[in-house]
């Protein structure tokens, strides 16, 4: 009976002790369990483009245990805590062994720490060499096991394990010491990442390579003894060199990363559409280009997919860290004069509206437009010249005449349709807008040329999530094809490849900006060269400074440009002599006369139902014969009647134009249902 009483008393004492222990653990105040991780900017394949330190200046990259090398995890448990999945935060056997060592040595040994106890120490940054510190670790470890799963505890270790200096966590360690992600490691690399957290300051490879090697080799020996790696693998891993220097973290697309971080400061991961190899190649290209530029000049580059709108590469400056060149300024976003690179838009609108054809003769001669007297760059005049040649050699007088016929407001409206933000001095666009008299960003110009590349349909560029929204049509597909055909045959310096790359260069007033924009059948790209502060760079021209870089970009995209698409079926490909009479010579000089043609029907914006007899159209004033166009394609020629039935195909939006015998025109946009 006495024996039973002692047993009951002992059991009651044990239960009471267990209950007291449970209450003690339950009352543990837990530190924050969600680690602050570095902001990361990722390429389209998920690879790291750029990372930022956390608030206290440490590198702590987010870690997904499912994307960590499995050999590393097996070696980690074999070395640190082989009973990790079987204990409740404290391993009694390890504690007994550690206690015996402490009695013999007179101090607390860390040999009894489980991974959970190490996590407790790391998240609190508590002491390790005192009984009080070890007791606190035990209490917190037990509390962590009650609150978290084993996978969550392991994830905390992977985030907080010290890797030397301001490095925390496995991924920070692999990037800094190995220059790679943690998903695929050699056995020697995995062993080094396990050895470092035990004594990061004493084993830092760049300072103490021999200590780092010795610690790594002990981890390898333990892994071989536990059967995690074979003898052959162990012997091969011992021969692998230890890294001798710390590597820099990736810092690609820094301007874009800064913009994304500023727009969403609470987001940890920013996924982009950038192609990492292409981004790196263009950053190297921009950096190399600085060698040929004045010390305060820089360069910006962009590449996009015109079909999806995805930005594939974005380089805001040649050297982000160079204060002399103001490298921190993102010149893909800065509003600058586009020079002559808007001229293709003017010609495209004129082709689309039926005002001109590539073989239409324009007048390159001295002219004044209400006091505005533009001149060609070479101050020479060529007389009658085809629209094709005028665009290819970038003449100023013909494009100003076309702009007068279209109206500057029409040009600004087309930019808005393309999604391009443009700023005009005094908010009053004049004829000079076609020669660069406005402010637009390199990104905006690339977006505009993307619309030309995709057959005249606007597309929204995005480096994060391109959205396939309803597209606005800037110009007809036929007009856009004509532009590509003309620009692909533009003259170029002999040192540039003879590729059929549709491109246009520009130089702003005072040599402040040199630009080149271009596209092939799959990509659109832009180059800007100049000073970020807007100061002139004497002797700088787009064709000399920007065009070679544009061709270098396309050289890095593959073995020469992708062929441009074929002409749409309705494209009017004719010699000058075969054109309808109104298109043979441009008559915009008299387009403002009181007897110029005017469309009486249909009115602007009308919705018309398509019937078998065609769509009714009527022109007033003007001189017969009349030529009618739908989206730039002729549908009725040499008509002497003012009223016509036009066979149009719907549904959709159509720009309907009529040109009289003297080349004067009128147009409306209607919807066919």
Image (cartoon, rainbow, N blue to C red):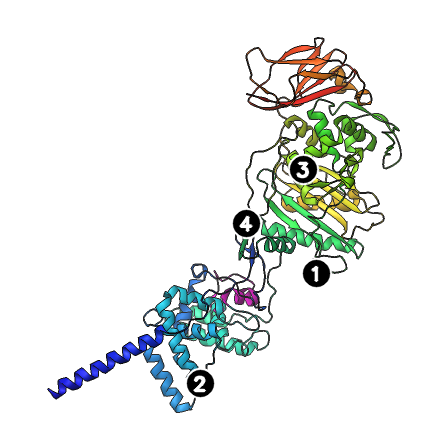
**Labelled disc at residue 321:** 1
Q: Magenta segment, which residues?
A: 169-188
Label 1 to label 4: alpha-carbon separation: 25 Å
Q: Give SS at disc 1.
A: loop
Upstream in the sequence, badge 1 or badge 4? 4
Q: CA distance from mark 2 to mark 4?
A: 49 Å
**Residue 42: quadrant of the picture:** bottom right
In terms of sequence position, does the residue under pointer 2 or pointer 1 come before the other? 2
Tell me the CA gap for discs 3 and 4: 23 Å
* Residue of label 3: 449
Q: Is 46 on the left or on the right of 596, as rendered?
A: left
Estimate the spatial distance between the alpha carbons at disc 2 and disc 1, rounded to whole Å: 46 Å
* Image disc number at residue 130: 2
Magenta-span inclusion, residue 628: no
* Residue assigned mark 4: 44
Instruction: Mark 2 and mark 4 in contact? Answer it, CB < 8 Å.
Output: no
Q: Is residue 523 left or right of residue 181?
A: right
Residue 630, image x and y in percent? Answer: 65, 20
Residue 319's place in the image compared with 408, above or below, is below
Residue 184 falls inside the magenta stretch: yes
Regarding residue 196, the answer to whether it shows in the image is: yes
Of the 4 image quadrants, the one containing the N terminus is bottom left
Question: What's the distance in space between the residues labelled 1 and 3, CA to CA?
Answer: 30 Å
Between 285 and 165, the residue placed more toward the observer is 165
């Amino acid at each position: 009976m006495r024996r039973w009483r002692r047993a009951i008393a002992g059991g009651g004492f044990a239960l009471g002790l267990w209950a007291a222990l449970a209450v003690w653990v339950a009352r543990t105040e837990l530190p924050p369990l969600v680690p602050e991780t570095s902001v990361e900017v990722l390429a389209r394949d998920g690879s790291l483009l750029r990372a930022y330190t956390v608030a206290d200046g440490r590198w702590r990259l987010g870690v997904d245990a499912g994307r960590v090398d499995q050999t590393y995890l097996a070696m980690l448990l074999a070395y640190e805590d082989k009973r990790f999945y079987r204990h409740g935060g404290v391993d009694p056997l390890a504690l007994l062994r550690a206690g015996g060592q402490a009695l013999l040595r007179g101090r607390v040994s860390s040999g009894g720490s489980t991974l959970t106890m190490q996590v407790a120490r790391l998240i609190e940054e508590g002491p390790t060499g005192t009984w009080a510190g070890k007791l606190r670790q035990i209490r917190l470890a037990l509390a962590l096991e009650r609150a978290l799963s084993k996978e969550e505890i392991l994830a905390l270790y992977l985030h907080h394990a010290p890797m030397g200096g301001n490095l925390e966590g496995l991924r920070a360690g692999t990037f800094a010491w190995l220059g790679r992600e943690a998903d695929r490691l050699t056995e020697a690399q995995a062993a080094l990442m396990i050895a470092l957290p035990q004594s990061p300051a004493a084993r830092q490879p760049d300072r103490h390579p021999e200590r780092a090697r010795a610690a790594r080799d002990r981890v390898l020996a333990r892994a071989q003894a536990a059967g995690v790696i074979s003898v052959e693998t162990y012997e091969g891993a011992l021969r692998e060199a230890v890294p001798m220097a710390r590597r820099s973290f990736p810092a690609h697309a820094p301007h874009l990363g800064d913009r994304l971080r500023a727009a969403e400061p609470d987001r940890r991961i920013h996924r982009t559409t950038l192609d990492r190899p292409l981004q790196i190649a263009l950053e190297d290209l921009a950096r190399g280009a600085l060698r040929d530029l004045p010390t305060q000049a820089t360069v910006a580059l962009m590449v996009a997919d015109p079909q999806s709108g995805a930005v594939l590469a974005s380089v805001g400056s040649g050297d982000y860290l160079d204060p002399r060149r103001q490298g921190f300024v993102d010149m893909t976003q800065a509003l600058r004069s586009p020079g002559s690179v808007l001229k293709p838009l003017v010609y495209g609108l004129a082709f689309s509206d039926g005002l001109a054809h590539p073989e239409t003769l324009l007048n390159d001669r001295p002219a004044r437009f209400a006091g505005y007297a533009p001149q060609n760059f070479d101050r020479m005049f060529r007389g009658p010249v085809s629209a094709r040649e005028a665009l290819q050699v970038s003449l100023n007088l013909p494009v100003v005449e076309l702009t007068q016929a279209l109206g500057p407001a029409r040009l600004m409206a087309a930019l808005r349709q393309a999604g391009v933000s443009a700023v005009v001095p005094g908010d009053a666009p004049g004829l000079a807008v076609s020669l660069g008299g406005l402010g637009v960003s390199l990104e905006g110009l690339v977006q505009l040329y993307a619309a030309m590349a995709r057959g005249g349909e606007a597309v929204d560029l995005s480096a994060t999530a391109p959205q396939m929204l309803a597209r606005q049509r800037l110009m007809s597909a036929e007009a856009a094809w004509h532009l590509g055909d003309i620009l692909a045959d533009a003259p170029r310096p002999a040192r540039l490849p003879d590729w059929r790359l549709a491109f246009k260069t520009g130089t702003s007033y005072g040599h402040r900006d040199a630009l080149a924009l271009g596209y092939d059948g799959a990509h659109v790209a832009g180059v800007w060269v100049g000073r970020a502060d807007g100061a002139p760079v004497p002797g700088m021209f787009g064709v000399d400074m920007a065009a070679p870089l544009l061709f270098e970009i396309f050289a890095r995209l593959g073995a020469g440009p992708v062929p441009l698409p074929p002409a749409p079926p309705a494209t009017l490909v004719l010699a000058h002599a075969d054109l309808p009479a109104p298109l043979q010579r441009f008559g915009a000089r008299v387009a403002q006369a009181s007897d110029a043609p005017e469309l009486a029907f249909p009115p602007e914006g009308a919705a018309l139902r398509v019937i078998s007899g065609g769509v009714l159209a009527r022109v007033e004033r003007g001189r017969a014969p009349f030529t009618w166009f739908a989206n730039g394609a002729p549908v009725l020629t040499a008509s002497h009647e003012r009223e016509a039935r036009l066979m149009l195909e719907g549904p959709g939006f159509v720009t309907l134009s009529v040109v009289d015998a003297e080349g004067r025109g009128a147009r409306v946009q209607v919807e066919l249902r």
